[in-house]
Amino acid sequence: MFTKKNKSNSIKLEKDNELVANKEIVVSKEEKSTQLSNTHKITSISSSCNISGDFILDDDINVFGHIKGSIRSNNGSVTIEKEGVVEGEIYAQTISINGKVQGLCVSENLDILENGQLEGVCQTKNLTIKKGGIFTGTSERTDKKIQPNDVKKELAQKKTEMAKLETSSIPAQ
């Protein structure tokens, strides 16, 4: 009627359960790190930032601030948020404008959203303008894809041009 409890068996079971639980934790951490390595990285430019310069990225960028220069994303998308302003060139697979852009946009897909304004030139395969979006300028339909080598060549050319400008603008003494 009464059975004697074996303390060693119950302790062993508890330890086995702990091992199983720890193993599950390790597996889930490994799965999470694998999932994170396969996702795009996103760069965000804060609304308090005013940046003058060129960006070259392999992934996505969200612009909340003001950029004067070019943005080139080889494999990702460029998103100009409602408060964001870009004066310059944007090259990306996908460009989404909900803020203001003045300049050139080259992409496969260009979306001007409800609060978006593009003033300039767009070269794109697919152009979408949502109700409320504003586009002033010219558009060209193109099947051109953004290639990393093209971006590197253009940047090298731009650096050469900038160096020439800097040397020519320095007054002789």
Image: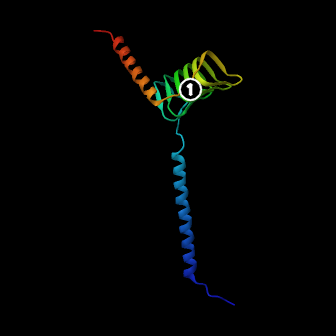
Tell whether 101 sits left or right of 133.
left
Inspect the image, locate mark 1, and give the three-letter code of the amino acid beneath it: Ser
Quarter of the image with the N terminus is: bottom right
Tell whether 80 sits left or right of 58.
right
Tell whether 156 sits left or right of 128.
left
* Residue 139: percent from left, percent from top: 60, 17
Q: Residue at x 49, y 35 (%)?
A: 58
Quarter of the image with the C terminus is: top left
Q: Quadrant of residue 136?
A: top right
Residue 161 seen in this snapshot: yes
Residue 47 seen in this snapshot: no
Give the residue pinned by disc 1: 107
Query: In the rendered view, would you say 114 is above or below 18?
Result: above
Secondary structure at numbered mark 1? strand
* Residue 155: percent from left, percent from top: 42, 24
Q: Residue at x 51, y 46 (%)?
A: 37
Query: In the rendered view, would you say 42 is above or below 151?
Result: below
Query: In the rendered view, would you say 4 is above or below 172?
Result: below
Tell whether 111 sits left or right of 172.
right
Residue in the foreground of this view, choosing between 136 and 65: 136
Dot 1, how many residues are within 10 Å of its Cα: few (below 14), some (14-19), or many (20+)? many
Q: Residue at x 60, y 25 (%)?
A: 125
* Residue 158: percent from left, percent from top: 42, 20
